């Protein structure tokens, strides 16, 4: 009976337990901050524009600055979940109204399915680097089963991560760091020219977690614990992860990693006891797929609040495995980037309305919450601002369209501009302009 009380309720109607302290939250976000994808992602950190490599000092400073900015956004988006006890997509009922919240919920479900499949692909590829004789498909299925099991007992899984997995991850990172610092070729040359785009890239890595922060923070004992866990745990882990990635890319060769991102795994396996410690990191990667599948589950509950989440967990787990087995998930990346840009301005709107315009005292997450069409305006303008100010535009028609839009309005992007910060600023200011007169009228009454 106590286990049931200490776990996530089966339907959205249940009362969420407040069992996660700052160490639980910090361990969860520290584990999420260490990503196998982050190792190969160091290539983009070092040379975000493709023609202006950063110096080692510039890359490390960009990592710290971008991580702090990005995790502060994630931490702020977590606090309303702690205070209301509601997951992220249900919180959007208070921002947009119940019916309008279904649109971003569907978008979130689509992107979480994609990211979940992508993580299973990464786990399988990394496991293959250790055990080359075992087929990729076997590792996908094994990772999918483990992911689904973690999703059925989410709070128990977080406590398990804190007690056992986090210590192994810390030891593994120290082990690899020691060997990489002594064996990697020195990183010489470079400049600070592409510092702003590098910060843009690191922020993007962090804020990709914004749509799910409240899913876990709703079980935090306090808002302070949720915020500190996100900012402290994720920042430290991401800085360590990208720092190791810089050296791993140097050892594997930038050309090899650019041709195949999984080539960055070879230096890890090659060090003494590398297979053992890299295996710990591969096992830990399952918390990334767990986080994505779990957030898909609670997002679905915004649409169907009385369905048992365990049914959703199994169904989403099976679907995620199927996608990882039959779809070229590498080609999904550009679409996921477009979808991700949706949520940065959206949660900027939520933060301003909730923290600055009195939303915390009137937040309505009921199934009949009235529609608030005016909140779509700052969200949409923030989305536009993201693509006008981002440092990188994807190849193909999407990038061509936004370059055409810049030319049409005579907008020239400056080197210091940042997509996530541009979207946040525009969405926040417009939200204030719309909401402040309404708040003053309410105060007068």
Image (cartoon, rainbow, N blue to C red):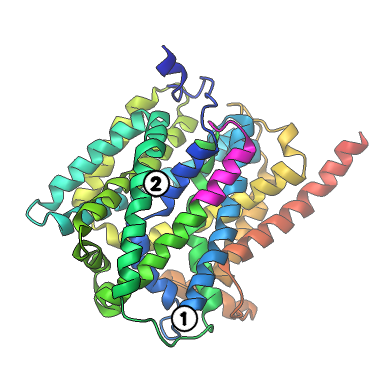
Q: Nearer the viewer, residue 373 or 81?
A: 81
Which tag, 1 or 2, sits closer to the chain's start? 1
Residue 123 percent coordinates (x, y): 25, 51
Q: CA distance from mark 1 to mark 2?
A: 32 Å
Q: Please say if the residues under marks 1 and 2 sit with CB atoms less than 8 Å apart.
A: no
Residue 156 percent coordinates (x, y): 39, 29
Residue extending farthest to the right is 444
Marking on residue 54? 1
Residue 37 percent coordinates (x, y): 34, 60
The answer to whether 213 appears left or right of 355 in the picture is left
- Residue range in magenta is 219-233
Marking on residue 112? 2
Residue extending farthest to the left is 133
The local secondary structure at tag 2 comes to: helix
Does residue 109 show up? yes
Q: Nearer the viewer, residue 9 or 264?
A: 264
Quarter placement of the N terminus: top left
Camera-near label (1 vs 2) is 1
Q: Nearer the viewer, residue 267 or 148?
A: 267
Residue 443 percent coordinates (x, y): 89, 37
Does residue 96 show up? no
Q: Nearer the viewer, residue 339 or 231?
A: 231
The answer to whether 164 appears left or right of 196 in the picture is left
| Residue 224 within the magenta-colored segment of the rendering | yes
Quarter placement of the C terminus: top right
Seen in the picture, residue 381 relative to 295 is either above or below; the reply is: below
Seen in the picture, residue 381 relative to 373 is either above or below; the reply is: below
């Amino acid at each position: 009976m106590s286990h049931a009380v200490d776990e996530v309720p089966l339907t959205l109607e249940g009362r969420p337990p407040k069992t996660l302290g700052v160490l639980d939250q910090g361990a969860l976000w520290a584990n999420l901050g260490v990503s196998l994808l982050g190792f190969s992602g160091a290539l983009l950190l070092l040379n975000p524009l493709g023609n202006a490599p950063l110096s080692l000092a510039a890359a490390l400073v960009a990592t710290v600055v971008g991580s702090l900015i990005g995790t502060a956004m994630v931490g702020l988006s977590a606090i309303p979940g702690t205070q209301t006890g509601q997951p992220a997509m249900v919180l959007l009922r208070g921002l947009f109204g119940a019916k309008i919240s279904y649109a971003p919920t569907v978008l979130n479900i689509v992107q979480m399915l994609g990211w979940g499949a992508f993580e299973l692909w990464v786990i399988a590829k990394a496991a293959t680097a250790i055990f080359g004789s075992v087929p990729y498909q076997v590792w996908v299925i094994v990772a999918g089963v483990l992911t689904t099991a973690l999703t059925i007992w989410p709070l128990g899984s977080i406590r398990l991560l804190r007690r056992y997995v986090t210590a192994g991850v810390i030891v593994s990172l120290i082990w690899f760091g020691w060997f990489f610092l002594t064996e990697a070729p020195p990183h010489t040359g470079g400049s600070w020219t592409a510092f702003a785009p590098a910060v843009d890239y690191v922020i993007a890595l962090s804020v990709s977690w914004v749509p799910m922060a409240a899913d876990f923070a709703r079980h935090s004992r306090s808002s302070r614990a949720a915020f500190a866990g996100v900012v402290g745990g994720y920042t430290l882990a991401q800085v360590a992860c990208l720092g190791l990635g810089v050296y791993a890319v140097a050892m594997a060769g930038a050309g090899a990693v650019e041709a195949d991102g999984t080539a960055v795994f070879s230096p890890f396996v090659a060090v003494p006891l590398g297979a053992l410690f890299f295996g710990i990191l591969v096992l830990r990667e399952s918390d990334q797929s767990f986080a994505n599948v779990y957030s898909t589950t609670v997002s679905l509950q915004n649409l169907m609040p009385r369905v048992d989440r365990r049914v959703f967990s199994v169904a989403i787990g099976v679907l995620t495995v199927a996608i990882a087995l039959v779809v070229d998930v590498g080609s999904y990346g550009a679409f996921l980037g477009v979808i991700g840009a949706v949520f940065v301005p959206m949660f900027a709107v939520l933060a301003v309305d909730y923290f600055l315009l009195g939303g915390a005292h009137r937040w309505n997450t009921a199934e009949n919450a009235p529609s608030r069409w005016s909140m779509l305006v700052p969200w949409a303008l923030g989305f536009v601002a993201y693509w006008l100010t981002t440092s990188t535009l994807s190849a193909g028609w999407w990038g061509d369209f936004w370059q055409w839009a810049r030319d049409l309005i005579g907008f020239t992007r400056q080197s210091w501009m940042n997509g996530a910060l541009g979207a946040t600023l525009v969405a926040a200011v417009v939200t204030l302009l719309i909401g402040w007169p309404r708040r003053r009228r309410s105060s007068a009454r």
